[in-house]
């Protein structure tokens, strides 16, 4: 396989994004759990809840710091590896990312200091306000970043200026309330809440297995199971909303997720298991459940979901239309002041398909001269690899239903006051909770993969192919930065895991077990009168 700048830049961005996303969900979820725990402390005044907040806050702090460190490079890559993309979307991305930095991140970072160092300097209510500010800031950071990402998936509220070759915002309201962005936000933060809940639940189960910190473990388990159960249910519901939006705006992504090569009569069936052959462009075998996919994706019984082959055929038509827009654009750029009205009208009539003409650039320098074979190849380049998409989605869904099951079980035991039974007769459930800690991260990474790989070859859906957005770099330069990022991020991940294990092993109260039995009385020191005479 020949290395090229586009694939290496994609690999580098994917690697840094996936590494960074190891820290994001736990930060989002733990911030809300900490605020909830501290609210209980302020309401009840019981010190055990304060110890809980401090302990889980230590783990939050470790994750927060390393999350910030890995996130700093993400935005730098826009200018470093994706120069034309940055120029193309600068007017659109500028506002959300600036607001995220000024309003959300500064809010979060400022109050994080008060959270850790304000216990003896602030009143209970003041410290609680600081903790909630951290939680709100953390979630707002996710909101603005996902608004920018959602726009890439469904670019609305902006128009292309042929003279500046940039997208320019014409409705910030549409950018802000983009339905794809809103669906992604609520789905992503809910996944973060599940991640934190499973993390707290698993560590609490480990303490119960070890017989350590039982009061803190029980309370943490109760709040994590309740919060996790509600969040897991919402993830499934909101995931359905994301699937519905994908059917409206990213039909190729949905068809690839389902390995649906041919358009079926409505309502379409759901492939539980399938094996796709990309060369033959068909499924070798598939186990189907009738009607289910049609109901999920369209919420109706009569709406047709187009298959991959049908979508490729539609793409061919848009590529040819886009070539006309591309030709008109070259004339406009050549002499903007003296362009005829006919040329501008031709561009405006075909502008919505301009991005499809760029799909031809890897095959020909002039899209207007593309052959039928080149158009066909460009159209099929819009189909992601089916097998990774198909099974990544199903791994994510399977994990989601497992989270509902396990949090529901622990919620039952905690709400009915039967957690002691787990330590005595149901220890296997505690072991399951401990070994389930990594699963939310697997589910989150699979979800992120489906969302981002599923829109390839588009860096901006239907407008700008990924191959056009890269910087003018050499393969060697990208390889060097890629190796540096891998080394740095791997080091940070090892540090995160080591610190987490260290402080989990130490436990609450700096290693002193607050649940350890204390002697009922102390033997008095011997006195002269009590010493028998020789």
Image (cartoon, helix red, strand yellow):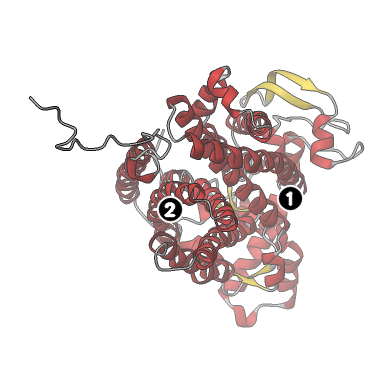
Quadrant, the N terminus:
top left
Front residue of 389/234: it is: 234
Q: Is residue 45 among what the camera can see?
A: yes
As drawn, the label of residue 97 is none
Front residue of 348/114: it is: 114
Q: Give the foreground label among 1 and 2.
A: 2
* Residue hosting label 2: 64
Q: How many marks do you count on the picture? A: 2
* Secondary structure of the residue carrying numbered label 1: helix
Q: Residue furthest bottom?
A: 337
Q: Is residue 67 left or right of residue 404?
A: left
Residue drawn at x 63%, y 56% is 150
Residue 112 falls in which quadrant of the image?
bottom left
Q: Is residue 453 among what the camera can see?
A: no
Residue 168 falls in which quadrant of the image?
bottom right
* Secondary structure of the residue carrying numbered label 2: helix
Q: Is residue 85 left or right of residue 254?
A: left
Residue 227 falls in which quadrant of the image?
top right
Query: Against 346, is 47 above or below?
Result: above
Quadrant, the C terminus:
top left
């Amino acid at each position: 396989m020949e290395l090229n700048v586009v694939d290496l830049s994609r690999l580098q961005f994917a690697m840094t994004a996936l590494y960074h996303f190891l820290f994001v969900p736990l930060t989002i979820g733990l911030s809300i759990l900490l605020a909830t725990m501290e609210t209980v402390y302020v309401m009840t005044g019981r010190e055990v809840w304060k110890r809980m907040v401090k302990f889980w806050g230590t783990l939050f702090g470790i994750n927060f710091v390393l999350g910030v460190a890995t996130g700093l490079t993400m935005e730098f890559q826009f200018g470093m590896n994706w120069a034309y993309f940055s120029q193309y979307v600068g007017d659109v991305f500028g506002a959300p990312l600036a607001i995220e930095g000024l309003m959300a991140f500064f809010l979060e970072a400022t109050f994080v200091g008060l959270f850790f160092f304000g216990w003896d300097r602030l009143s209970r209510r003041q410290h609680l306000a600081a903790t909630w500010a951290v939680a709100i800031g953390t979630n707002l950071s996710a909101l603005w970043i996902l608004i920018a990402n959602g726009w890439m998936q469904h670019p609305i509220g902006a128009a292309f200026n042929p003279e500046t070759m940039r997208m320019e915002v014409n409705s910030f309201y549409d950018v802000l309330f983009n339905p794809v962005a809103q669906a992604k936000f609520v789905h992503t933060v809910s996944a973060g809440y599940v991640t934190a809940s499973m993390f707290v639940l698993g560590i609490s189960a480990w303490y119960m297995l070890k017989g350590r910190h039982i009061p803190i473990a029980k309370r943490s388990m109760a709040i994590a199971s309740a919060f996790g159960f509600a969040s897991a249910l919402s993830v499934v519901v909101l995931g359905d909303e994301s699937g519905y939006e994908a059917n409206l705006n990213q039909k190729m992504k949905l068809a690839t997720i389902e390995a649906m090569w041919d358009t079926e009569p409505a309502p379409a069936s759901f492939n539980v298991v399938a094996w796709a052959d990309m060369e033959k462009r068909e499924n070798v075998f598939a186990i189907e459940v009738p009607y289910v996919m049609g109901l999920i994706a369209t919420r109706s019984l009569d709406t047709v979901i187009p298959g991959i082959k049908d979508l490729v055929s539609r793409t061919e038509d848009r590529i040819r239309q886009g070539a006309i827009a591309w030709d008109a654009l070259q004339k406009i750029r050549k002499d903007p002041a003296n362009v005829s009205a006919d040329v501008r009208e031709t561009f405006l009539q075909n502008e919505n398909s301009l991005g499809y003409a760029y799909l031809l650039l890897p095959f020909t320098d002039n899209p207007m001269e593309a052959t039928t074979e080149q158009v066909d190849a460009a159209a099929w380049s819009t189909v992601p690899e089916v097998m990774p998409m198909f099974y990544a989605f199903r791994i994510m869904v399977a994990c989601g239903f497992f989270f509902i099951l396990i949090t529901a079980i622990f919620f039952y035991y905690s709400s009915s006051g039967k957690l002691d039974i787990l330590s005595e007769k149901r220890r296997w459930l505690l072991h399951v909770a401990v070994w389930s800690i990594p699963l939310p991260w697997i589910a989150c990474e699979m979800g992120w993969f489906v969302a981002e790989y599923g829109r390839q070859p588009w860096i901006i859906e239907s407008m700008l192919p990924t191959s056009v957005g890269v910087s003018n770099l050499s393969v060697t330069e990208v390889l060097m930065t890629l190796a540096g990022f891998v080394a740095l991020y791997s080091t940070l991940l090892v540090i995160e895991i080591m610190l987490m294990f260290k402080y989990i092993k130490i436990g609450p109260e700096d290693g002193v077990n607050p649940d350890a039995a204390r002697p009922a009385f102390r033997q008095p020191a011997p006195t002269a009168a009590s010493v028998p005479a020789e």
